[in-house]
Amino acid sequence: MNIIFAIIIGYLIGSISFSYLIAKKIKKVDIRTQGSGNAGATNALRVLGWGPAITILLLDATKGIAAVLISNWVGVDSWIAFLAGLAAIIGHNWPIYYGFRGGKGVATTIGVFAILVFIPALIAGGVAILTIVLTRYVSLGSLIFMALTPILTIVMGDYSTIYIILATLIGVLSLWRHRANVHRLIKGTESKIGQKKEVTS
């Protein structure tokens, strides 16, 4: 019963779309019809500006943190808390409250990884941030973070097999959600931070 509760709560928390709510509040628009059409922090940056985007990033990360911590609070095993975090990411990507049209789950994933595999996530996050600063490709930084965190989880050898499996599953899910960005990066048509016309997230 606890595992079902953890997954359901995680999904419902993840389904709260802060980018949708804040865009509605500030500009009275559905952010999914603006910019790239993605309900996430990067699209919020181009549509709403830095302040709202940073707020959305933090709130979306908090969803992943909350899903994990609530699961721990009800006394489930740590790997079940990882499942709750995965459910929150799925909720962000396919939110029940908004017609199952959401974002790509990067910030929520950051929250989940920060709690459960902190050191690998910290190292991968540093590399991702440096990549974004040097290239101005947010998507490239996100892809590096999602791929590198599971790899470091394996290499560091401090985590159980189930942690490695779930971290890898989350990374693969995010890479799949970014498949269009990968295609544009390969073609050289991906947009950078600061470009007037951006079509990615």
Image: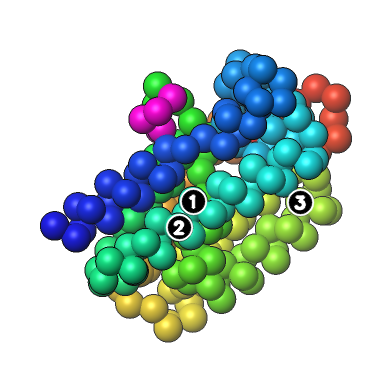
Closer to the eye: label 2 or 3: 2
- Residue for badge 1: 63
**What is the total number of numbered labels drawn onto the structure image?**
3
State the residue position of label 2: 66
Task: Give the image location of residue 58, x and y in percent.
Answer: 63, 51
Quick one: label 3 or label 1, which is nearer the N terminus?
Answer: 1
Q: Please identify the quarter of the rendering in which residue 30 is found.
A: top right
Between residues 191 and 62, which one lies in front from this camera angle? Answer: 62
Label 2 neighbour load within 10 Å: few <14, some 14-19, many 20+: many
- The numbered disc on residue 132 is 3
Is 29 located above or below residue 66 in the figure?
Answer: above
Q: Position of residue 171 (x, y in %)?
A: 46, 53
Residue at the outermost left position:
1
Spatial distance from mark 3 to mark 1, Cα to Cα?
Answer: 23 Å
| Amino acid at pointer 3 | Ile
Coloring applied to the structure? rainbow
Q: Nearer the viewer, residue 106 or 84?
A: 84
**Can see residue 200?**
no
**Cα separation between marks 1 and 2:** 5 Å
Q: Tell whether position 95 is magenta.
A: yes
On the image, the x and y values in percent for residue 56 come to 64, 42
Residue 168 position by quadrant: bottom left
The stretch in magenta equals 94-98
Label 3, secondary structure: give it: helix
Is 179 left, or right, of 95 in this rendering?
Answer: right
